[in-house]
Image: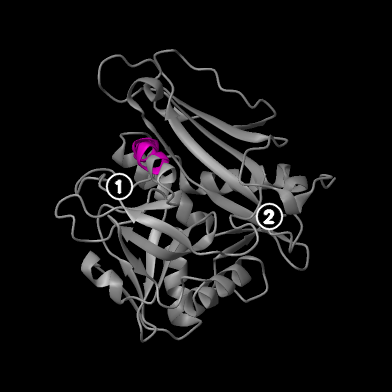
Amino acid sequence: MEQNMDWGSLGFGYRKTNERYVSNFKNGAWDAGVMTTEDTVTISECAGVLQYCQACFEGLKAYRTEDGRVVTFRPDLNAKRMADSAKRLEMPVFPEDRFIDAVEKVVHANKDFVPPYASGASLYIRPYMFGSSPVIGVKPAEEYQFRMFSTPVGPYFKGGAKPITIRVSDYDRAAPNGTGHIKAGLNYAMSLHAIVEAHELGFDENMYLDAATRTKVEETGGANFLFVTADNKVVTPKSNSILPSITRRSLMYVAKEYLGLEVEEREVYFDEVKDFVECGLCGTAAVISPVGIINDHGKEIVMQNGNKEMGPITKKLYETLTGIQKGKIEAPEGWIREIK
């Protein structure tokens, strides 16, 4: 039974839904996993996640299409990225096929919470894994828990995609050979002070530069950058210390194959940012958040084609990818998985 909810006024926050998926790793193997209505977690006070932040997570969405189907977008890439995160953190990999099966079970069990088409809302799915057994010496835990819950969320933008203002941060997000390329909880913990400080100073987000030379653009605390040149080339930074965004990879494919644009993934030096005409932040929550102004310690870089409203190329990318996600535009093979 569909929930009686004011879908149009939903914010991006947590609401408890019907069921979630839980599987435990013990004695070298994952158990069969179960669906449960229990939404609390009980672990040792000395659990690895509490002592040494041994945790990783993912984020994806389920949508209701124009013809009423419920679909998810490229969950296989989330499964692969979580496997990469687990390996880097010395955690057992949750099998990728079981990850996708868990997505299907969770969405199916909470179909009532998938918002209607055109409401601007969606069902956000959060898989995560953490060290659950006691660890007091610095080493990996021996037992782990994998969980996946869902929650209905509203659109990232309220009242339109108004360009945001960001600042060049003096903090470093990730070391060159650190954990910036995986979705580890610790990466986000260290970004909290920087984002709170940015908000206090009137900025929406931070632009992090590379830690080694502070000359190249990396990403924000939770999204990849995408730039557009004056001749409509779509450019995204390349680095081994940024997270490989699924949304960004999808947008680059859409730019080339659907819109016929030239695309380039390369190192982007900060001193060339002033020459771009559009800038966006790519992520699951908003697809693209347009950036209008980048503040470099008081000196403003204003995006020529995107400082008042979403720029024309960014808008085409946004509309095409969301059209694919919601079934209005034919998707590349394997991108859309229907939940029965």
Mark 1 and mark 2 in contact (Cβ < 8 Å)?
A: no
Q: Going 60% across and 68% down the picture, which residue do you hit? A: 322
The residue positioned farthest toward the left in the image shown: 213
Q: State the SS at label 1.
A: loop
Q: Nearer the viewer, residue 94 or 151?
A: 151
Q: Going 65% across and 61% down the picture, which residue do you hit? A: 159
Kind of residue at disc 2 = Ala
Q: Nearer the viewer, residue 103 or 217?
A: 217
Up-down relation of residue 236 to residue 186 (above or below): below
Q: Which residue is mark 2?
A: 121
Q: Residue 255 appears at what percent x and percent y?
A: 45, 78
Q: Going 52% across and 45% down the picture, which residue do you hit? A: 99
Q: Going 46% across and 73% down the picture, which residue do you hit? A: 306
Q: Residue 221 appears at what percent x and percent y?
A: 38, 48
Residue 253 in view here: yes
Q: Residues within 10 Å of mark 2 (few under 14, many from 20)?
A: many
Q: State the SS at label 2.
A: loop
Label drawn at residue 88: none
Residue 32 in view here: no
Q: Report the side of 251 relative to 36 (left or right).
A: left
Q: Residue 41 appears at what percent x and percent y?
A: 56, 22
Over which residues does the magenta segment extend? 185-196
Q: Residues within 10 Å of mark 1 (few under 14, many from 20)?
A: many
Q: Nearer the viewer, residue 50 or 137?
A: 50
Label drawn at residue 180: 1
Earlier sequence position, callout 2 versus callout 1 = 2
Q: CA distance from mark 2 to mark 1?
A: 29 Å
